[in-house]
Image (tube, rainbow, N blue to C red):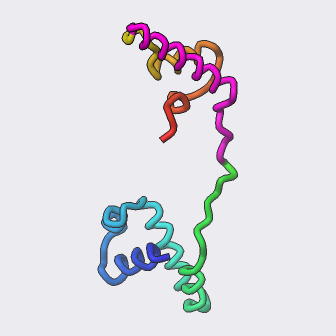
């Protein structure tokens, strides 16, 4: 809620551009534009005070209905686990250069018909 107030303050009172606001607050320019357009629409309504209070108290809505399910299945996890075990055993035997890297595991999974991205093979952050 403070973010909306600070964006409107910086735009109306300080006279900052949308780009400068987005840089200073480290948010997207489209977010700044959306908030300012909501503000302008609220001002031009029949009761601007009520519209502005609604604007500042509304919780943000996130649309997650378009998100696709993740492709990381138990089969893929098992394949990755097997590759990691083989690599660990090669390191123990002194064959460090023959271990499988992340990109090698990804290519192996692609060759076996799994449709996953490289980021799926990477460890979670």
Q: Nearer the viewer, residue 33 or 60?
A: 60
* Image location (x, y in percent) of residue 20: 31, 66
Location of residue 74 (image quadrant): top right
Q: Nearer the viewer, residue 16 or 111?
A: 111
In reply to whether residue 88 is colored magenta, the answer given is yes
Q: Residue at x 34, y 63 (%)?
A: 19
Q: Main secondary structure of the magenta part?
A: helix
* Image location (x, y in percent) of residue 95: 39, 7
Vertical comparison of 45 with 113: above or below: below
Q: Residue at x 42, y 13 (%)?
A: 91
Vertical comparison of 30 with 14: above or below: above
* Image location (x, y in percent) of residue 51: 59, 85
Tally of numbered tags: 0
The answer to whether residue 44 shows anywhere in this view is no
Q: Residue at x 30, y 78 (%)?
A: 15
Q: Is residue 113 left or right of residue 23?
A: right
In reply to whether residue 93 is colored magenta, the answer given is yes
Q: Nearer the viewer, residue 75 or 69?
A: 75
The answer to whether residue 91 shows anywhere in this view is yes
Q: Which stretch is magenta?
A: 67-95
Q: Nearer the viewer, residue 94 or 19?
A: 94
Q: Residue at x 46, y 75 (%)?
A: 4
Q: Which residue is at the far front?
A: 92
């Amino acid at each position: 809620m403070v973010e909306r107030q600070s964006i409107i303050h910086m735009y109306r009172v300080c006279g900052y551009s949308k780009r400068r606001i987005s840089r200073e607050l480290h948010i997207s320019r489209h977010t700044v534009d959306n908030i300012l357009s909501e503000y302008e629409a609220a001002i031009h309504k029949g009761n601007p005070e009520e519209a502005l209070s609604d604007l500042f108290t509304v919780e943000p809505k996130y649309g997650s209905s378009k998100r696709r399910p993740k492709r990381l299945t138990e089969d893929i996890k098992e394949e990755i686990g097997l590759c990691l075990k083989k690599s660990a055993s090669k390191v123990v035997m002194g064959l460090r250069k023959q271990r499988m890297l992340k990109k090698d595991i990804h290519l192996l999974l692609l060759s076996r018909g799994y449709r996953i991205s490289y980021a799926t093979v990477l460890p979670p952050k």
